[in-house]
Image (spheres, rainbow, N blue to C red):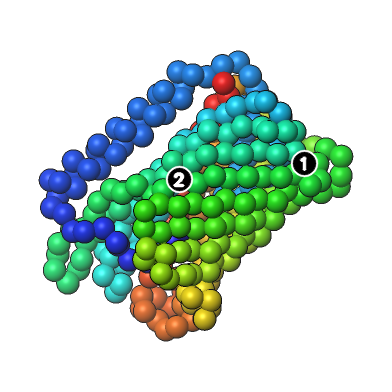
Amino acid sequence: MFSKKSETKPIDIETQSHYKFGMINKNLCLVLLVVGSVGVANANERMFTYAYEPETMAKGTWEAEQWVTWRALRNKAVGQDDFHLWEFRQSIEYGVTDNLTTELYYNSQQQSFRDPATGKHHGGFRWDGLSLETRYQVLNPAEHKVGLTLYLEPRFSDSDGEIEQKIILGQRHGAWKWAFNLTHSLELENKFHDTEGELEASFGIARRLGKHWALGIEARDHNELPGYSQWENTVFYLGPVVSYRRSNWWASLSVMPQVYGLNFTGNIDQNRSLELEGHERYNTRLIFGFSF
């Protein structure tokens, strides 16, 4: 989800700090609760944070995940100087069958920026709805040359929603592993009155470095189509990803700067090599997973 403009009401710095730290404390408490519930089962670890892999969970197994995504820096030309958006997701994942996995998410976010015209800081914390992810494995990569999984995730809050679909491909070759996703999202905005399409291609490749660590690279191309009436922009991110796993937990971190962006409707952000109206200069994501 890429929101172009802040939809939160302006608040003063003291109130903003109160919301911000309250939000962070709440999410840290949820992490601690999840850690406390960890058992001894094997974790269904991920080697990438944006590209999904075709593997699904074993039947009857459970996992909790904590996502933290930091999207940083737009620019003064679009009225959002010193822009920061923190996205938090807490989830519970369950293996319905060996080929079918479901995951329930609680979504929230904290956004802040400064209006260069007035010098005033804007920001706030808001709940971003619940979403239910379903992944069905069509081809098991352990039995076929390429694994194939289909993905569907509807998300709804009190004011907007999203329906996301993915085609997930991937395979392991010795210590190497790769994944490729094609994604379409239908955004329902402004109390479900407006629509926007999003198209994305994401790719990751990584290599195991011993028993616990893996190191690789991820790439994403993200595109926005407001009202499906025009192709507004295209943005390419590229950066390293590192993952670590133990018997019952895992973590993956990717740092992806925007290396190229283009707005087809005009040079709104006054930058001819990056797209900083609806996208950020840097995207960083950390995911923890715990089996129980």
Image coordinates for residue 148, horizontal then vertical, percent:
76, 49
Label 1: how many residues lie within 10 Å, few (<14), some (14-19) or many (20+)?
some
Image coordinates for residue 179, horizontal then vertical, percent:
69, 49
The disc at residue 172 is: 1
Q: Quadrant of residue 173?
A: top right
Tag 2: amino acid? Leu
- Could you give the CA–CA distance between mark 2 and mark 1, rounded to whole angstroms? 32 Å
Identify the residue position indicated by label 2 in the image.
Answer: 130
Up the image or down, 133 lies above or below 112; here it is: above
Please say whether residue 67 is visible from this viewpoint. no
Position of 84 compared to 161: left or right?
left
Label 2: how many residues lie within 10 Å, few (<14), some (14-19) or many (20+)?
some
Image coordinates for residue 62, horizontal then vertical, percent:
60, 27
Q: Quadrant of residue 95?
A: top right
Tag 1: amino acid? Arg
Q: Residue at x 57, y 21 (%)?
A: 292
Up the image or down, 30 lies above or below 157; here it is: above
SS type, badge 2: strand
Tag nearer the camera, 2 or 1: 2
- Given residues 1 and 103, the one toward you in this image is 103
Q: Are marks 2 and 1 in contact (CB under 8 Å)?
A: no
Image coordinates for residue 35, horizontal then vertical, percent:
46, 22
SS type, badge 1: strand
Q: Residue at x 36, y 58 (%)?
A: 159
Sequence-first tag of 2 and 1? 2
Q: Residue at x 58, y 66 (%)?
A: 199
